Image: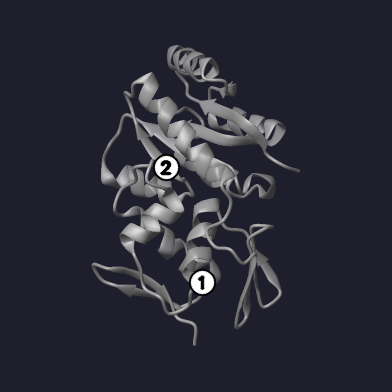
Amino acid sequence: MALSENTILLVDDEPDILEFISYNLKKNGYRVYTATNGKEALQNAREFLPSLIILDVMMPEMDGIETCEEIRKIPELKNTIIAILSAIGEDYTQIAGFEAGADDFIKKPIKPSVLSSRVSALLRRSQSGSTANSSVIRLNDIIIDKDKYLVIKNGKEIILPKKEFELLSLLTSKPDKVFTREDILSKVWGSDVVVGDRTIDVHVRKIREKIGIDNIKTYKGIGYSYLGS
């Protein structure tokens, strides 16, 4: 089942924030659904299949990090963009969000015009497709099907969040080529989206954990490469 284009699920336990952000997003032409806690967010996400979910961190019952982790377990939402919204700006909070499968981190407070630009950039990246021309990449025991956003290793399907998938697709598109950190940020996250420098490192580590491969080589201070042999 396809995701609903330009549909946003906004999750925050503060009614005033929900109303304010919803109003401004709707004014820019987005269809917006809301939830006040993580459990309600999971229910609405399954029902509405949003293209983008904006999650507050501090919520009762289930916080934004836990909710993000649970959303990433739902196959129908594997391509949904998730942005963490938080007044907490510490690195460890951002890293926790990226480790849970988030694609972006938005710090409160944020001006409506800036938020709209961030949302537009995230959805534009979501709708632009994969990062390389060939739709299927075969490398030893791994198959990457970019049309289906599917990774198969030794016949077993592995579900990756969208950014992890796009990062793996980029690295494997040209085995042994060293992609600089600037290249990766530009091609996977886009120049319109501002993310922390640790973002790439977190995503590479998650890919290594899930796929169990040592083929991704780190070039300290430069970037990463997927070893073809």
Mark 1 surroundings within 10 Å by alpha-carbon count, few (fewer than 14), some (14 through 19), many (20 or more): many
Above-or-below relation of 42 to 201: above
Q: Give x and y (percent) for residue 101.
A: 49, 49
Tell me which amino acid carries mark 2. Answer: Asp
Of 135 and 53, nearer the camera is 135
The answer to whether residue 63 is visible is no
Q: Residue at x 54, y 62 (%)?
A: 132
2 or 1: tag closer to the N-terminus: 2
Q: Residue at x 38, y 39 (%)?
A: 105
Of 120 and 21, nearer the camera is 120
Question: What is the secondary structure assignment of the residue under circle 2?
Answer: strand
Residue 210's disc is none
Q: Residue furthest front?
A: 133
Of 19 and 171, nearer the camera is 171
- Which one is in front in this view, the residue at disc 2 or the one at disc 1? 1
| Residue, disc 1 | 172
Please state if 5 lies on the left or on the right of 192 as rendered: right
The answer to whether residue 122 is visible is yes
Please state if 55 lies on the left or on the right of 135 as rendered: left
